[in-house]
Amino acid sequence: MDKTEQLAQWIGECNNVVFFGGAGVSTESGIPDFRSQGGLYSQQYEYPPETILSHEFFQSHTDKFYNFYRRKMIATHALPNSAHYYLARLERMGILKAIITQNIDNLHQMAGSSNVLELHGSVYRNYCVNCGAFYTVDKIINSQSVPRCDVCGGIIKPDVVLYNEPLNQRVWQSSLMAVAQADMLIVGGTSLTVYPATYIVDCYRGNRLVLINKSVTQYDYRANLCINQPIGQVFDLLSNAI
């Protein structure tokens, strides 16, 4: 039995699967990741991306933040790929109970998933920092400079977690609870090098930890099943098995 067949068998035997995904889930939809060769962090900008995407930079250089954010962080052209659709299918079957994602692109919801815990928020939600008025992503895209609230004139901020901002505690606690209750945790498309990814995996106490990533991770030795392939490719094969 090869690794994909083993994974398919385990999924068929479980009834509480949780998926935790990173940027690699969306790269096959044409959204660049951060840390791989050719990723966002390997490109040259006036300021490092980590600086631009920080809470402090948003407050002190809001115009430059939005110049970068519009060009590099919003990808409304992207469509779900086979990984997103396969996970939505597992949810409809009652096998997959939650998706925990570090991505902010809304692709899981576009594919049909409903229980999606967005650790870092979403580019599709935006709020005035003064009055809390909600705005769609179109408001950000169509603004010429810093987007302003139509109600009070305040600055609009994307509902994304910037560097040096805390995670949404409701989402975080729901994610930890989902992992603690899971009989199987599938981790895909993440290098597992930074918090909170590392903590999510540490919280799993079951014996069916599956890691799917193109490159080796520091947690491979702990996995009950490790598949070093693109996640879309793996899920394409699974779609024919389940």
Image (spheres, rainbow, N blue to C red):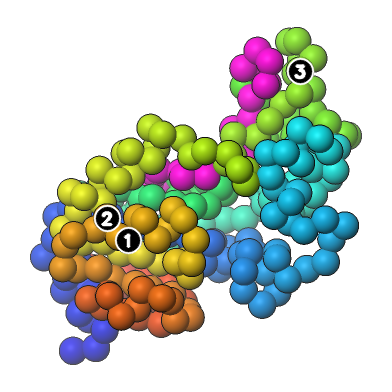
Q: Residue at x 26, y 61 (%)?
A: 185
**Residue 114 position (above or below residue 51):** above
> Residue 100, percent across and down?
38, 50
Tell me if 101 is positioned left or right of 42 in this view. Answer: left
Tell me if 6 is positioned left or right of 121 in this view. Answer: left
> Residue 93, percent across and down?
21, 52
Could you tell me which quadrant the N terminus lies in? Answer: bottom left
The residue tagged with tag 3: helix, strand or loop?
A: loop
- Give the Cα distance between marks 2 and 1: 5 Å
Provide the residue designation for mark 2: 203
Provide the residue designation for mark 1: 201
N-terminal-most mark, 2 or 3: 3
Query: Disc 3 marks which amino acid?
Result: Gly
- Give the Cα distance between marks 3 and 1: 39 Å
Q: Which range is magenta?
A: 111-133
Q: Residue 222 versus residue 78: which sits nearer the camera?
A: 222
The residue tagged with tag 2: helix, strand or loop?
A: loop
Query: Disc 2 marks which amino acid?
Result: Cys
